[in-house]
């Protein structure tokens, strides 16, 4: 069984808790329908949602790097998530990444917005009927992100689904991001594995998300 990064540090805090935590971590990392990158992004996104920027982020950053995730992809994940988790938390998060030795950004060019299409465009159009000003801001934010390099659309959608589960935005937002993930190649078992993996970060939230994504049929 692969040793999870930071296991020794957890043992020093409380040996019994460490056994629980390591077992829970192996649940996520053993799921077959998420890629290693996606599992790393799940953990790094969870750290922003709590937020947990100390030992948990250090452990998850090490796990990401050990599994071949490049520094620019980690930076892009956090750039992508800014409007979803809130810009203020990204300031200490990037400060913490620097303290942990993440290399400086290589992508420093201007951001070029790309017109929204498909599901994203429809979602913004529907929002405009409710609140036009919010729709305009949302369109601006999304158009700057979803076509950028370093992350695939599937990876971006999965990260957004993590936010939906943490924040329990289980209606329109969850359906949009699940639809984007499916369109980008995520199978039903991919989404089921995601919910199973997120149980580590809050069983009750994962339970509610499972009921929303996979409603029981009579």
Image (cartoon, rainbow, N blue to C red):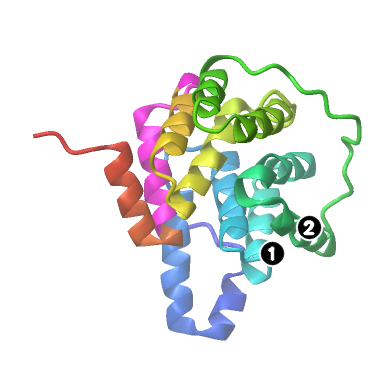
- The secondary structure type at the circle numbered 1 is helix
Which one is in front in this view, the residue at disc 2 or the one at disc 1?
A: 2
**Membership of 163 in magenta stretch:** no
Which residue does the image show at 64% across and 33% down from the upper left? 133
Report the predominant secondary structure element of the magenta stretch.
helix
- Estimate the spatial distance between the alpha carbons at disc 2 and disc 1, rounded to whole Å: 16 Å
> Left or right: where does residue 114 sit relative to residue 34?
right
Name the residue beneath numbered marker 1.
58
Query: Residue 204's x, y, as percent?
Result: 33, 60
Residue 41 locus on image (x, y percent): 60, 46
Numbered range of the magenta stretch: 183-199
In the image, residue 15 sits, relative to residue 92, either above or below, namely below
Residue 91: image tag: 2
- In the rendered view, does 211 fall on the left or right side of 37? left
Q: Quadrant of residue 7?
A: bottom right
Q: Is residue 180 above or below residue 79?
A: above
């Amino acid at each position: 069984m692969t040793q999870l990064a930071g296991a020794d540090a957890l043992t020093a805090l409380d040996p019994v808790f460490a056994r629980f935590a390591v077992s829970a971590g192996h649940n996520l990392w053993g799921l077959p329908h998420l890629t290693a990158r996606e599992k790393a992004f799940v953990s790094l996104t969870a750290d922003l949602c709590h937020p947990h920027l100390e030992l948990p982020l250090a452990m998850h950053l090490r796990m990401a790097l050990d599994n071949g995730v490049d520094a620019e992809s980690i930076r892009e994940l956090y750039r992508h998530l800014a409007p979803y988790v809130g810009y203020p938390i990204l300031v200490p998060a990037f400060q913490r990444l620097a303290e942990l030795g993440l290399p400086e950004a290589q992508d420093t060019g201007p951001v070029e917005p790309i017109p929204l299409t498909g599901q994203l465009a429809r979602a913004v159009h529907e929002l405009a009927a409710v609140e036009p000003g919010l729709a305009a801001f949302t369109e601006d934010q999304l158009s700057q992100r979803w076509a950028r390099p370093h992350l695939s659309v599937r990876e971006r959608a999965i990260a957004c689904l993590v936010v939906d589960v943490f924040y329990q935005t289980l209606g329109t937002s969850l359906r949009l991001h699940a639809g984007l993930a499916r369109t980008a190649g995520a199978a039903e078992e991919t989404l089921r594995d995601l919910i199973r993996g997120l149980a580590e970060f809050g069983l009750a939230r994962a339970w509610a998300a499972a009921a929303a994504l996979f409603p029981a049929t009579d």
